[in-house]
Image (cartoon, rainbow, N blue to C red):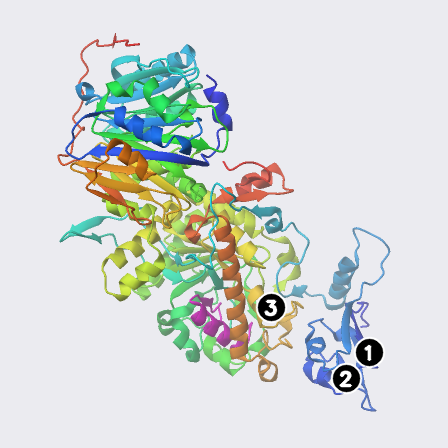
Amino acid sequence: MKTYQLPEVIIERDKDKCINCGVCVRQCAFEAHKFDEEGEVYSEDEKCVACQRCVSLCPTNALYIRDNKPFVKDNANWTAETQKYIWKQAETGGVLLTGMGNPKPYPIYWDHILLNASQVTNPSIDPLREPMELRTYLGSKPDNVQIKMVNGEPVIETKIAPNLVMKTPILFSAMSFGAISHNATVALAMASKELGTYWNTGEGGLSKSLYQYGPNTIVQVASGRFGVHSEYLDAAAAIEIKIGQGAKPGIGGHLPGEKVGRRVSETRMIPVGSDALSPAPHHDIYSIEDLSQLIYSLKEATEYTKPISVKISAVHNVAAIASGIARAGADIIAIDGFRGGTGAAPTMIRDNVGIPIELAIAAVDTRLREEGIRNKASVIAAGGFRNSADVIKAIALGADAVYIGTAALVAMGCHVCQKCYTGKCNWGIATQDPHLEKRLNPEIAAQRLYNLVRGWSHEVSEMLGGMGINAIESLRGNRLHLRGIALSKEEMDVLGIQVAGSPMA
Amino acid sequence: MEGRKYRGNYRRNISGCGLAGMMSEDGRLMSGEPIIRAMEVLHDRANGLGGGFAAYGIYPHKKEFYALHIMYDDIRAKEATDVLLDERFEIDSEETIPTRKTPGIGKSPLLWRYFVTPKADRCTTDTCEEDFVIDAVMHINEKVEGAFIFSSGKNMGAFKAVGFPEDVGRFYRLDEYEAYTWIGHGRFPTNTPGWWGGAHPFTILDWALVHNGEISSYGINKRYLEMFGYKCTMLTDTEVGAYAFDLLLRKHKLPVEIACKVLSAPFWDEIDRMKEKGDPMADVYEKLRMVYGSILLNGPFAFIVGHTNGMIGLADRVKLRPMIAARKDDMLYIASEEAAIREISPELDRVWNPKAGEPVIGRLKNPVNNNSKAKVKAKAKVKETVA
């Protein structure tokens, strides 16, 4: 069938600059660049995914990829994108698939929230000269401590549940081996160790070679239970039960058999070449009490030595669900907003289901405080965090820490082309092709991840100091330091903030 | 008096201030005259928009009763409050708080004090008496237009007004009272003036707190305290400090030194160094910060807190506001400036500048127990108006 779809981009090659070296040909797994019969390089626009790999590596800067906005008659309803989707489905009869997070122009509340700073009445603190503390503990805390005096020295009698301790309130979000390459997981693990934070295996299991990074690893138990066994649980610093993911709330996952090679097969404990299907619900969790059973099964299995996290996507009733999760015994609640990324999701679900993480954090934090159970569980926010300002605003709204996924991938080289599900990632990140994977040097990628989080942490310190605060816990849930701009009253009510220009009350 | 109207606009107490406190650890009773003089030395740290004092041991003849000091905008506010008080308390006596005409003190609200004890049938076994009193105070302060309870402890009282502190002290005739602990405050607010209730000290039960500074962590401290049922109706950082002491010391029963380490916590670097040296306190401080991070008071402050059995001075963890302490015989002095202490006690045994986060703690040598139940004489609602 002839496709009616138009190329999304146009590849421009400056013939004066091109030296016909063939780097672009070798770099493009989508085969957008080719040699013709005479050995001249040419390009096929319709194959290009705009990952910018060729542009970045072209030695003479001869390539430029530009958007191909096809002309469709001016129509707010039947846009070029809408028509493209219809052509695609008319040609395949399938579900529209995509990768990465929700790209639609929904309001980004971070960009409507402004931070405070000190002037005169309260000195700002200079983090270059004074201590600035970002250390964060994730896990359940008691409401109070009991102190006993032993030989005149105070001793804390209250037993405190295991907590994760981290130097900065930023963790790497769940990305499974399978969705991303082995080298990418190595880079995340190495960077986490160096940064004093954690990375998350996703539901892909943990390769034995990475057990050495166990103290910086959160392992996931998802509905497919891939790669879950006692050594896996023992190796980890914490265990996360994955209920949902921001990019695809309410549905399961699908790793196509083509991506299940020998190593993926080993860590997931499934045959080579078989599809890895994660059911939409856990088939042993049909209610909150079932979740509680799984939480306590995992606690029993690990002898109450590790915090148990439960990850959910931000949906309309997120506050009540989070409250139930805290009461079910979870030590950490991870909430993934609708801009959270994915290796593969149905486009319609990614773009239309769930709510923004900003509103979810505020609703959950408020609810847990109203119920007096905010100490019972820490809250990790996830889903589209782009920079340190997003991070610090999330903490001021009430999150204990933030998961970053897409930002980490971008640091490693991802250009957000949204073709992760094809397995042809030219950057060696979202692929299992050994030739492509080799392009990602884990040490260099780890350095880039380290630099990113270090930079963000410095920026968070500067902003904290500007507010006259020298410990992150004094900003956590401290919404008085936030102001809304160009938001409705209802939106500000949910966020629990006041309009810019209102005083400090 | 435009209290209610101002209260609506009354925002956080962003202010520079002067503080002084003096305590006889032997429990000797002293007139209010020296503390007034100490505050007079600190005149320039205030701007005339608020001054106040708290005194402990002033009502020995009524020491079993909660002494409620209440300011009313008008008689209607009093009538509305009286109904609520009658529902909750046996009232031993009520009277106006004696004052004298003083230049520098403007029009006064109606100032009353009541000596009360919770009604037995209202204060059931599962709520302790103190919580019942706190609830009643918070309820009235929140709900009754034009009424404000600014002191609610036993055998103690707070006195405050708009004006310079030395004038406020004379206005309330504090030279005629005798107390073993006095604390004073002069306010330099940078925001709305005008409401008497906005002056320091802030009190709850027998906790009275005077404060110089701004708590940048106020937003989370307030939300944390709300989880434990405190209502921060005043929107001031100082109020948060008073409730924090009540929570940590009275409810969670932490030793006072430990509570101070919660509010002005040691840095992680310091804790880590202690851990390396094998100091067992490292574990205590780490857990305190884990559990009580939300009530860490962050930002520049110096506090003096009075309570029945002592006085506490505490500055923030990097000491961004001044606080000096001194001892002479049984006396403990704390003030913003040494000059204020030297004014009332030129000879001192020891003067020191407490380090950031290092509390100064005064304790009565013979602690007082005010928990004995008060008994109200039958039909004892006699008005003993002293005006």
* Residue B246 seen by the camera: no
Residue B43 coordinates in the image, percent (x, y): 39, 30
Would residue B223 be found to the left or right of residue B114 on screen? right
Q: Residue furthest bottom?
A: A38
Label 2: chain letter = A
Residues marked 1 and 3 touching at CB (< 8 Å): no
Identify the secondary structure beneath mark 2.
strand
Disc 2 marks which residue?
A: A34
Disc 3 marks which residue?
A: A410
Are both tags, 2 and 3, on one chain?
yes
> Is tag 1's residue or tag 2's residue first in the polypeptide sequence?
1
Label 1: chain letter = A
- The residue drawn where x is 45% and y is 23% is B195
Callout 3 environment at 10 Å: few (<14), some (14 to 19), or many (20+)?
A: some
Picture quadrant of residue A500: top right
Identify the secondary structure beneath mark 1.
loop
Residues marked 2 and 3 touching at CB (< 8 Å): no
User: How far separated are the C-alphas under marks 2 and 3?
Assistant: 27 Å
> Is tag 2's residue or tag 3's residue first in the polypeptide sequence?
2
User: How far separated are the C-alphas under marks 1 and 2?
Assistant: 15 Å
* Amino acid tagged 1: Asp
**Where residue A14 is drawn, which disc sits there?**
1
Residue A424 coordinates in the image, percent (x, y): 64, 77
Nearer to me, A114 or A305: A114
Q: Is residue A486 magenta?
A: no
Picture quadrant of residue A227: bottom left
* Amino acid tagged 3: Val
* Residue B250 seen by the camera: yes
- The magenta region covers A178-205
Q: Which one is in front in this view, the residue at disc 2 or the one at disc 3?
A: 3
